[in-house]
Image (cartoon, rainbow, N blue to C red):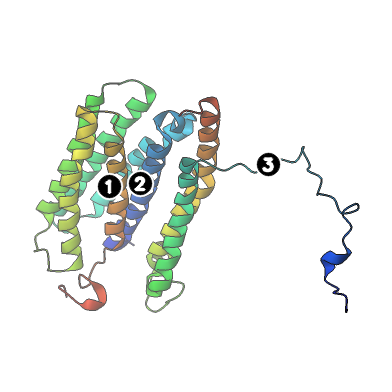
Amino acid sequence: MRQSFRPEVWVNSDVATGIPRDEGRPVAQRRSPRALAVQLLGPLTVIGGIVWAVAQPYRVAFLDRADRDVYDYLVQPPLLVVAVGMLFAFAIAPGLVEDLELSEADDPDS
Amino acid sequence: MIPTAESAHWLAAATALLLGLLLLSETIVGVEVFRRRPWRAYLFPGVVIVASVLLWVVTIFSTFSTLHLLAHAVWAQAALLAGAVQLAVVRGRITSPLWSLVPAFALLVSGAAFLVHEPNDWLFSRSAFLHHAIGWMLVVVAVFPLGEALRPQRVLWRAGFALTFLLLAVLLFADRDAAPIFGRYGIGGP
């Protein structure tokens, strides 16, 4: 009878052991729904601005340069939405999430 | 060179969007956590007061008609008043929830100013449509700070107040100086 050469045939249980668990390794913790919601506000706003720029490229002066004045370049609605979303995501949300997690650690029932 | 009206409205929309995000995040995490860092507590009243000062600058240029001038002056004064009260609340100078009647009054007066200074019908143009829509929206959403004054500490009032600014941002971003109401569908307007 022809012998099968499937890999499991050659594994010796005396040699193959389980993967040792590294107890000191930091475990990823799941964020609370509230922290996740705060973190998502900025990126969702940025995505909204990008989708708007794709849907209406003529609202972005850089993409549609015909007959534009200086204010058209300074004030471009989809880019304003992106800028506000990034401001919130990078300047406000991180500290807010940090404080929220500290608060939840102090009072897990909150 | 004076910017076009729509450029000023889009800047106002961006400010409203920022205020909406601030209020929504405050609603999500709670007032205590939000005000844990002092600079963050002063952010909302600070932005409102700066915006109200800029609104006074806009008022100077809004000389198309007396009604436009008066309407912009009313918005600037209402925003300044609401921002000042919120600043006093954050500083702990005033504590009564009844002070929420001030932003309720500001929203009501601002809405009335929108409705009064628009001389055209709803379907005349996009600008006219948005003036009517924003005006009635502001009149209706005055119920949120009113509710906060009468039955404080309810999430509904805070969430409603936050969403008010987000909706205001959407409507202001949709503004054009000359455009049909629903864009490509060409309903109403020049």
**What number is the disc on residue B164?**
1
Residue corresponding to mark 2: B20
Q: Using residue B29 as the reference point, say whether residue B85 is left or right of it.
A: left
Q: Using residue A77 as the reference point, say whether residue A91 is left or right of it.
A: right
- Could you tell me residue B130's position as x and y percent? 20, 60
Quadrant of the rendered structure where residue B176 is? bottom left
Q: Mark 1 and mark 2, same subunit?
A: yes
Residue corresponding to mark 3: A27
- Could you tell me residue B26's position as x and y percent? 40, 37
Q: Using residue A25 as the reference point, say whether residue A32 is left or right of it.
A: left
The type of residue carrying mark 3 is Val
Front-lying residue, B7 or B111: B111
Q: Are marks 1 and 2 in contact (CB under 8 Å)?
A: yes
Q: Tell me the residue at 16%/42% (across/down).
A: B108
What's the chain of the residue with tag 1? B
The type of residue carrying mark 1 is Thr
Q: CA distance from mark 1 to mark 3?
A: 40 Å
| Callout in the foreground (3, 2) | 3
Q: Tell me the residue at 12%/53% (across/down).
A: B115
- Could you tell me residue B143's position as x and y percent? 18, 39
Q: Mark 3 and mark 2, same subunit?
A: no
The relative height of residue A98 versus residue A66 in the rendered view (above or below) is above
What's the chain of the residue with tag 3? A
Instruction: Give SS at disc 1.
Output: helix
Front-lying residue, B17 or B30: B30
| Mark earlier in primary sequence (1, 2) | 2
Q: Tell me the residue at 40%/31% (across/down).
A: B31
Query: Dividing the image into 4 quarters, which one contains the C terminus of chain B?
Result: bottom left
Quadrant of the rendered structure where residue B97 is? top left
